[in-house]
Image (spheres, rainbow, N blue to C red):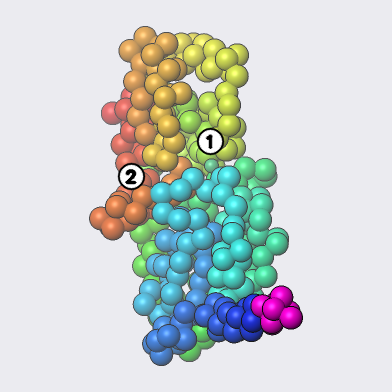
Amino acid sequence: MNQSRAALAAIAVVIPLAMLATVYTGRPAQQGGQEHDKVRLVASFYPLYEFASRVGGDKASVSSLVPAGIEPHDWEPTAQDRLRVSDADILVINGAGFESWAGEMEAKVVVDTSQGIDHGANPHIWLDPVIAKHQVEKIREAVIVADPANADYYKKNADSFLTELDQLNSFIKLQLADCEKSDFIAFHDAFAYFAARYGLTQHAIHDVSPEGDILPQKLQQVISLANQLGINVIYSEDLVDSRLADTIAGEIPGGRVLVLSPVEGIKQQEQDAGIGYIDKMKENVANLRVGLECR
Ligand SMILES: [Zn+2]
């Protein structure tokens, strides 16, 4: 008797909790009338988050699935992330195989920003500012479909960012126009499109992901390559442990380590300081100029 009463009491407790859960997992937008009117975009990781934020301006609420400063390659969505996606109006992804989890998401609309780009097996298309423009245009199209009443506003926002990307492209060309070297050693194979755009040859310590173990033979290969090409700058990244790059640089005469950011994430304190994609790309160019011995 006591047992079944206890069981009933347990059920009585469980049911209201379950009901509460369904109420409170609803869109946070319901809490405030203004938020409710905004187009809700969820971007997969940093550059898409910035691109979507620039297009959406204050008429969209944009969030990133991968938290600030976290390397996105091995990131996996939680149940909560899935809810965020199914609740949003648009899921913005890089595509080209970067988000291996994207197919499992129940999104209303998915914008694959790599669509229409000839990308092969390497997903790092955003590091070519010309391809990044295409990604911004794909986001613009989708946001306009979701909120046609504000089409002019989104077009204006996109145009202003596209102009900045054009200027960045010209800036990079100019900065890298007169260099002694054209080969550089990146931490991972992220700069293939960038290198192709600016006539450079990228070599990489890691393959398409900056994580995982590196065999001693591979390390030796990189050191030999650096010596053979007279390279003395080894590039590390802003979101990885630089010890591997330090080790390699230590084996090269005059070797040193500089950062070449794949812009796969920007730390919160940097974002708060207003540092974004274009700043990171300009830092990259400044560090590349050292390694390539540009005048
Ligand atoms: Zn990468």
Query: Residue 282 shows which numbered tag?
Result: 2
Please indicate whether residue 291 sits to the left or right of residue 273 in the image: right
Percent of width and height locating residue 38: 45, 82
Residue most extreme to the front: 1
Question: Which quadrant of the rendered structure holds the N terminus?
Answer: bottom right
Any magenta on residue 36?
Answer: no
In this rendered view, identify the residue nearer to me: 32 or 245: 32
Can you tell which of label 1 and label 2 is closer to the viewer? 1
Residue 92 appears in the rendering:
no
Q: Is mark 1 within 8 Å of ligand 1?
A: yes
Tag 2, which secondary structure?
Answer: helix
Identify the residue under disc 1: 210
Does 220 appear above or below 235?
A: above
Any magenta on residue 3?
Answer: yes
Q: Main secondary structure of the magenta part?
A: helix
* Residue at point 36%, 25% (across, down): 257
Does 250 appear above or below 278?
A: above
